[in-house]
Amino acid sequence: MLEFIINYFEKRKEVSTIVVRPISQNSPNTSPLRQGPHSPRIKGSSQSPQRKNEVDPFTLDSIDELVPSQTVKLSDGKVQITVDGPSLVGYLQNARMDGKSAFEVSVSAADQKGETMTIDFASHELWFTCLCRGHEDAAQLRKIFMEGTKAAEMHNDALQDLREDRPDLWWKVLFFARDLLRLGRNDGGPAERLDAAQRDPNQWYFFSSVYFGDDLDRILDIPGPTGPTLRATLHHIFDNSEGGEVCSSHTLFPLVQRFFRFRKEIWEQRDFKRKYGEFEKAWEKQKKKNARR
């Protein structure tokens, strides 16, 4: 068997460590891992959780009917979910293209009593168990999480550079996000600005020079929390949406929030209210100036 232990030592910094620990007599490595000061905490009990699912949440097939060599067991110490390996890999890969890190998704299934149980991938300790040798999904899962940690580090650096080097551009991101959330509730400035953004020949799914000026490409080319840039993620989401339509507040806003990591509580801060007010006044002033032409 192959155990994957995913730990978050400092969640605020989004630092994660993946330890791959082969066990069993057939393992090429039977020596225990050294436990350093920052090593993942090993479970105190070797017993498996009692709550288990009977039906795979991805394929909806009975667990007994799944091919054992293709199943993966997920455990957070409280519940255990058995899933189809290829389906889990596909789920995580699709989430990655949607801008969702493998560390922020969840999988839900029903237990024997029909009650819903959920494995949150942001759990303090998460175990992936699957056959060790010749298991393609094991290599895929290891790759997904290893690449995920590297992508998160690059993403953190990109956001830090943006805030420190171009605070004015950072504020524009927040203004754009605020307008996305206000669209439909307000027929004034937000709707007018987003309409103008859609008419911009250089716009990329609402991201436009209307908000970002000559710095549009810098925003679109920011590497996301999963690796793909904002430009690539937007293209994937719009290209795979039903009818080609995406809701600004339910789809686009959460994406912007994930990419730029801010909370809606910022709307209540004095600095934001002042700067957003200045932004709206500048828009109205420019609108009047254009009307006189």
Image (spheres, rainbow, N blue to C red):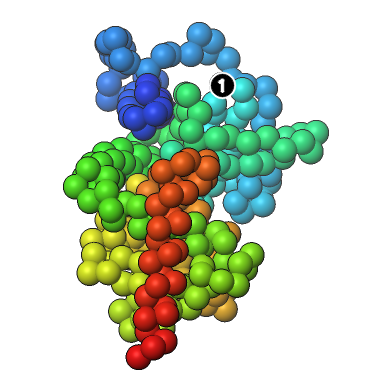
Residue 111 coordinates in the image, percent (x, y): 73, 35
Which residue is at the front of the view, 133 or 120?
Answer: 120
Where on the picture, by quarter, is residue 27?
top left
Judged from this view, the residue extending furthest toward the left is: 165
Front in this rendered view, residue 177 or 78:
177
Q: Name the residue under label 1.
A: 77
Q: Which residue is drawn at 54% across and 26% down?
A: 76
Residue 244 to residue 5: above or below: below
Vertical placement of residue 179 versus 72, above or below: below
Residue 266 visible in rendering: yes
Residue 267: image x %, image y %? 50, 46
| Visible residue check, residue 204 | no
- Where residue 83 appears, as percent x and y from the top left, is 56, 43
Q: In this view, does 148 lie to the left or right of 127?
A: left
Q: Which part of the image, by quadrant, shows the C terminus?
A: bottom left
Q: Residue at x 32, y 15 (%)?
A: 39
Q: Residue at x 32, y 51 (%)?
A: 170
Q: 205 or 107: which is nearer to us? A: 205
**In the picture provided, is 75 more to the left or to the right than 270?**
right
Q: What's the residue at 59%, 46% (across, down)?
A: 66
In the image: residue 270, left or right of residue 75: left
Above or below 124: residue 158: below
Instruction: Name the secondary structure under disc 1.
Output: loop
**Which amino acid type is shown beneath numbered disc 1?**
Gly
